[in-house]
Amino acid sequence: MTNETRALRAPGVRPRPYPTALFILGSAAIHFSVAPMHFQEYVPFGLFFVSAGIGQVALALGILTVPARRLFLAGAAGTGALIALWFVSRTIGLPIGPHPGRPEAIGFSDIACVVLELVSTLLLVRAAFRRPKSRRRGPVRIALTTAPAVLLTTILTADGVGSAINDMPYAFNASPIVPGQAATNLALLTEAPGSEPVKTFTLTARVTRIKGQDAWTYNGTVPGPVLRVTQGDRLRVTLHNRLPASTTIHWHGVPGLPDAEDGVAGITQQAVTPGHSMTYEFVAREPGTYWYHSHQDTSSQIGRGLFGALVVEPKGGPTESRDYTVVLHGAVDVSAVAINGTTGDLHLDARPGDTVRLRIVNAFAPGMDGGAETPVLLGAPYRVVALDGRDLVQPQVLPAERLPLGMGQRADVVFTMPTSGAVRLVDAAEKGEAAFSIPTTRPATVTVGDGPAPGAVDVGRLPLFDLTRYGQGGADPVAAAHADATYPIVLEAQGGFHDGRIELVHTINGRPSPYVPPLNVREGQVIRLHIVNRTPEFHPMHLHGHTLSVLRKDGRPIEGSPVHLDTILVGPHETWDVAFAADNPGIWMLHCHVLLHASFGMSMTVNYAGISSPYEMGSRSGNVPE
C-alpha cells in the first residue's frame, strides 16, 4: 500500500464518495439493461456494454474501498471516454457495426446514462483534487449529503432501465414461419389477374412548401388527389417516394383488398425507401367512400399530409346531381381543422332542386382524448345514406344533428337544395373526459349553393346522431350467424414505458403493441368481438381487410338498419359488440385510429391460420407501422 493510499484511508482524512458511487452504479445498470438488444444488433456491441457495466461496478466498489487519487482520475478518464464514444455514435456514427458511419438515434436511456456519467465524471475529478477534511463526517451528515444523489440516481436509473427494457423491438414478426408447419407467404396474396377495366394513377410522395410550411404531400397537395373510379375497376397505383424517409400507402376500408396490397410497413410489406417506388393493384369491388394514407410512422406522416380520398362510384354512375368529397384534416400552418385544404369557407356549386351527396371523410388527428369530429348540416333536411362506405337501409330524413365521426370514419349525406339560399356544413367536436387535449379551432365550413347561408346556431346544443336507432331493419347474415369464437378487446391506458419512451401506454388486453397476442382465426369462421373501453378517451377501432357488423352498444341491440363499418367509434367507458366474417386470409391490423393511441401501443393483429409474414417491424428493418 502506497503512502498516498494510507493517507487517503486514514480516519478523518477524506469523506467516502458515496454519491459518486451511486451515479456510477446507475449508469452501469443502464448499460446492463441495453446489452440484450445490442447483442441482437451486433455481438461485439453487446459485449462492449456488458464490459462497460462490469467496469463501472468495479469502479464504484473501488472508490469506496480504496479511494486513491489515481483511481479517481482513471475512473474520470474512462467515464469521459464512454461519453465521447456515445457522442461520436450519435453525431457521425461509428466505423464498425451493422451500419458503419450512420448516426444512431438518441433514446431516453441514452440521455439518462450520459447525465449520470457526466455527473460522476465531475465528482471523480473533484474527489481527486479535494483537500482532506480535518475530521470524519457523522452518519446524519452523510445521510443528508447523500440523499439528493440517491433520489436523482433512482429516478434516472429507473427511467433509463425502464426505457431500455421497453425499447422499440430490434426485430418483431407478427406471424413468423414455424419450422415444420406449412404456411402461405402473405406476399403471395395479391390480386389475381383479370379483365377488369384498368385505372392507372401515380402518387408521388414529396416535400412541398404550403403556406410557409414544409408539408409531406401526394402530388404536391394536402389532401392528396381524390382517386375516383367505378365499381369493378382495377386500380393500379404507383407510389414514387421522394421523401427523406420510408413510406407506404394503406387503402383504408376497401372491401376485399388482398393482404399484400394493404400497405402496412413491417406486416404486409417492406416500407418503400427514399428514391424507390411500388405499385399497388386491386379491384374496387364495392362502391363507397374510402381513403388512403401512409402506414409507416403513421402518427407522423398522416399529420404531415400523407392522405387522400378514394371514391368508388356504382356501376350506373352517381345517382345525385352533385357528388362532392369533403375531407376534414389538420391544417398545415395552424392548430385548426381544415376542409379540403382550406381553413376558410369552401364553396361548392349547386342549384335549387339539385340533389347533393357530401362524402365526409374524417382524416383529422385528434389529441389524447381522441374526440370525434361532429359535423352538422344546416339549411336543409338530409339523410345519412352510408357509413364507412356501406349503405344503410331506408335512411330517414333528419333535422340538424351532429354526426360523430372518429378519425378514419366516413359518412355520406344526401339532401335536396332548397328553392332559395345556401346549405352549410359546420364542423364541431365531441370531447372525451381525458386530459392533455390540445385546443383546436374549427373555422372551416362548407357552403353549398348560392344565396343567404343559414344563420348562426349553437352547434354544441344539437343532438348527436345515433347509428343504433337509424333506418329500417334488414338482413345481416353475419350478425345472425352463430359465432365460431368470441374475443374480448379490452382497451386501457396507464403511465409506463413504450418504445424507449415514458408514455401514457395504451394497451389491448393488458399489453401494448407489438406484444398483444393476436386473434387467431380460420377462413370461413364468424368472429365476434366484445370491445370494452376502460379509458376516458374515444377509440375509433379500425380492422383492416374486413367489415364489422354492429351488434350491440352497452349491451343494447341495434334497432334500425344493419350497420357495417370498418372503424367503430368506442366512446369513454362504452362497450360494443361486433362481428365479422373471416373471409379474407392474411395478417391484418386491428388498432385505434387515434394516431397517438396507436403509437402508444393500442394495436394488434388478426392472424389467419396457415399464413406467415416475411416482413418484420422494429429498428433493424426500419418498419414502424404506427
Image (cartoon, rainbow, N blue to C red):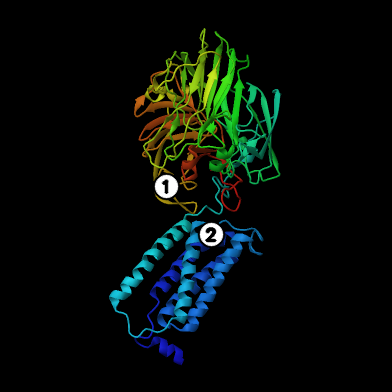
> What label sits on residue 345 in the rendered view?
none
Q: Nearer the viewer, residue 557 or 251?
A: 251
Name the kind of residue labelled 1 in the image: Leu
Near mark 1 (Cα within 10 A), the count class, few <14, some 14-19 or many ≥20, is some
> What label sits on residue 37 in the rendered view?
2
Q: Nearer the viewer, residue 580 or 223?
A: 223
Q: Position of residue 549 (x, y in %)?
A: 46, 26
Residue at image position (39%, 64%) is 152
Q: Position of residue 619 (x, y in %)?
A: 57, 53
Find numbered disc 2 in the image and state the secondary structure of the residue it sits on. helix
Measure the C-alpha gap from mark 2 to mark 1.
23 Å
Name the kind of residue labelled 2 in the image: Met
**303 in relation to 25, above or below:** above
Q: Position of residue 398 (x, y in %)?
A: 43, 15
**117 in relation to 322, above or below:** below
Q: Earlier in the sequence, mark 2 or mark 1?
A: 2
The answer to whether any part of residue 483 appears in the image is no
Residue at image position (33%, 85%) is 135
Q: Position of residue 320 (x, y in %)?
A: 57, 13
| Residue labelled with disc 1 | 504
